[in-house]
Amino acid sequence: MRWLVGLCLVLGGVVLATNPGSAGVLDASWTAPTTNTDGSPLTDLASYRVYYVAAPASPCLGSTFGLVASPTPNPPPGQIVSARLTGLTTGTPYNVAVTAVDTSGSESACSNVPPSALAALELSVAPTGAMNFGNVNLGSFSDQIFTVQNMRTVTVSGTASVSAPFTIVSGSAFTLAGSGTTQVTVRFTPTALVTSTTNVNFTADGDSTSRSVTGIGFSTTFPLTVSKTGAGSGTVTSNPAGISCGVTCSAAFATGTMVTLTAAPAAGSTFTGWSGSCTGTGTCTVTMSAATTVTATFAVQTFTLTVSKTGVGTGTVTSAPAGISCGASCSAAFATGTMVTLTAAPVAGSTFTGWSGSCTGTGACTVTMSSARAVTASFSITSSGFTDDPLVAQTTAVKAVHIVELRTAIASLRTRNGLPAFTWTDATLTPGTSPFKAVHILEVRTALNQVYQALGRSLPTYTDPTIVAGQTVSKAAHVQELRNAVRALP
């Protein structure tokens, strides 16, 4: 190299203090070279490299250095050049050396290595520990103050920053001369019922210091929210007032308040119960210690339509909309206001004779469900329901099949009117085989008379009122008058 290296390095920054979460700085200065080794003026100086390393290692031409541009390519005599090393470990001694670099990139030899110096604080921030804002109500805020002091002898400029829900109210930018101080006011404005923790960062000339801040979002009130579900409709109100849902389905109540909710179904609906923080179908009472949600379920009101059948005939009754098929299902629930049409269909040998209860006549039965309804369908046996109908006195022979048919019709009447089954002589009669007996007529009369008595009706009048088994001759009239008496009952 042809340079006369007149680099005389001086280090500053020997102030040492305990300051958690901060980085140290170190000042270096030197006199710029002015001539080359041959005595000619220096005209192509481009920059300086400031090498540094933790003592006792040698800094020269190491991997860690700072680059400082030369103020001029031809320094005048006595020019002082300075640099600040930042991001160092506070309180650690460092060795530093400097080299000069010309415009072609050639580098001089290292300067002298002065005694090591301790990396110093740029700023001191009090308090030194974490700042706790405590519990702060939502919708409110709390302020705390940090005191920032310049720990250098030179003037420093810096900024303070923090992330939400904290903000810098004042002192976000500052300039401190000598050992001057400033105050930075930090505000905590909670937006949720959670604990928030972050750092306030203080920076100056590349140095940084941080302080932890924490605060808890708090509330002396909590929201109570009501939701409604189901196909029905209704309102929910609160005591104390605040909720009228309907329109207002959420309100805030003070901690410890006992709030009673009452559900009122609209016309045509029914309240079926609470879920969430309440159960059951009565009033709902909650004590407010946290945000609370309650759901009220409203269903469309239903009423039961019941169909019964009477008479000695048989048949089915069905509904539109579906639900009743009677037959098997003779009762169903329908939503209020539903128009239900019932249709009666007699089986072969029977006829539909009409409705009673909520309908009359023999056509289709239509009822509108505004309350529980009951309808009765009457079925009778047609003339074709009996063999040899009508029987002709002194012409038609009395047969076992005639008794079997009467027994079947009377058994149906007894069941409909709550009478027990009758015990018959010759319980099984085979048409064309079983002999016909007078006792068979006598038993059928007795079984049918009991039905008339149960209904409070006068007994039928019979030919040969007294029948003597083994003596009285069975006649066609005996069977025909029994048939007529069966048909006379509903």
Image (cartoon, rainbow, N blue to C red):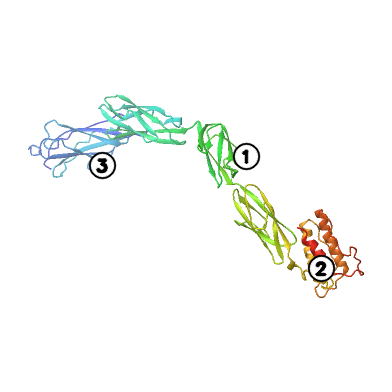
Q: Decide: marks 1, 3 in contact (CB < 8 A)?
A: no
Q: Name the disc covering residue 64, or none.
A: 3
Give the CA separation, mark 1 to mark 3.
Answer: 78 Å
Q: Is residue 356 above or below residue 283?
A: below
Residue 32 can be seen, yes or no: yes
Labels 2 and 3: the sequence-earlier one:
3
For discs 2 and 1, the disc positioned in front in the rendered view: 2
Say what secondary structure mark 2 lies in. Answer: helix
Q: Is residue 234 left or right of residue 408?
A: left
Q: Which residue is painted at 58% across and 46% down in the image?
A: 299
Q: Earlier in the sequence, mark 2 or mark 1?
A: 1
Residue 151, image x, y percentages: 30, 27
Q: Residues within 10 Å of mark 2 (few under 14, many from 20)?
A: many
Residue nearest the viewer, comparing 160 with 69: 160
Indicate which label's residue lies in the foreground, 1 or 3.
1
The residue nearer to you, when weighing 443 against 193, is 443
Residue 133, numbered label: none
Residue at mark 2: 403
Kindly identify which residue carries mark 1: 282
Q: Position of residue 472 (x, y in %)?
A: 90, 68
Q: Which of the 4 quarters of the picture holds residue 59?
A: top left
Q: Marks 2 and 3, Cα distance to the nearest angstrom?
A: 124 Å
Secondary structure of the residue carrying numbered label 1: loop
Mark 1 / mark 3, whichever is N-terminal? 3
For label 3, the SS is: loop
